[in-house]
Image: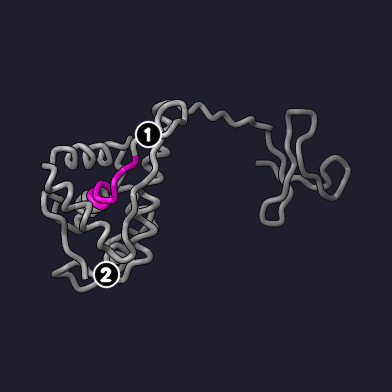
Amino acid sequence: MALVSGALFSMEASGAYGGSIVFGKWKGRQYARQLVIPANPNSADQEAVRNRLRATGVIQKWVNATSLVESGKTGTDKTRLVAATPGGYAWNGWLVDNCVGKGGLTYDAALAAHAALTAPQKTAWNSAATALSPALAPVYQTQAGGTAGTPLTAGEVFFIYRYGLSQAGLADAPNGTPPTYA
């Protein structure tokens, strides 16, 4: 990015010029960049990424807001995550990395493992997720074209979270029985 001083013979410039360049200010510094018109393809792949981000956003919000401690552990999940996060990472970025994985492989594996559960096991995960404080809620999902998809249940979100913790080495891989928090 080029630094601009006296852009267009003025002391400050902002906005588009000539349909090809944009002037603006970032942290008090003037800059100029190429005008880029964003594309929003709403392709199946793009919507899959957005769905993952919605789910992991809900997970991060829950981890940050809860003071519950998993049965048999001494600290909250957040304190354990912060302590285990490698240098150079923020705890929440590391959590998302472990929940999503490269190309969404971990996220997809978590959903496949949840789909393999029996109906009573899925009900148990959903009940456990809604009993948390604050409760995990279903997460809106979209499909190709940006239309509404089938929402993730609270139990699926909780399962994805626990699957991510297992990838981080902070929990056992989730199974048919959800963990208890108090």
- Marks counted in the figure total 2
Quarter of the image for the N terminus: give it: top right
Select label 2 or label 1 by which is in front: 1
Q: Residue at x 36, y 46 (%)?
A: 139
In the figure, is residue 115 to the left or right of 67?
left
Looking at the picture, tell me which residue is in the foreground, 4 or 62: 62
Q: Residue at x 68, y 33 (%)?
A: 34
Q: Residues within 10 Å of mark 2 (few under 14, many from 20)?
A: some
Residue pushed farthest bottom? 74
Task: Where is residue 59? Give x, y as percent.
Answer: 34, 54
Assess whether residue 156 is covered by the magenta stretch. Answer: yes
Residue pushed farthest right? 9
Would you name the residue on which mark 2 appears?
68
Q: Name which quarter of the figure residue 49 lies in.
A: top left
Q: Which residues are magenta?
A: 151-159
- Residue type of the residue flagged with mark 1: Gly
Task: Where is residue 72? Give x, y as percent.
Answer: 13, 70
Cβ atoms under marks 2 and 1 closer than 8 Å: no
Camera sees residue 168 = no
**Alpha-carbon distance for marks 2 and 1?**
31 Å
Q: Which mark is residue 1?
A: none
Q: Name which quarter of the figure residue 89 lies in.
A: bottom left
Kindly state the secondary structure of the residue where label 2 is placed.
loop
Q: Which mark is residue 149?
A: 1
| Magenta region, main secondary structure | helix
Kindly state the secondary structure of the residue where label 1 is placed.
loop
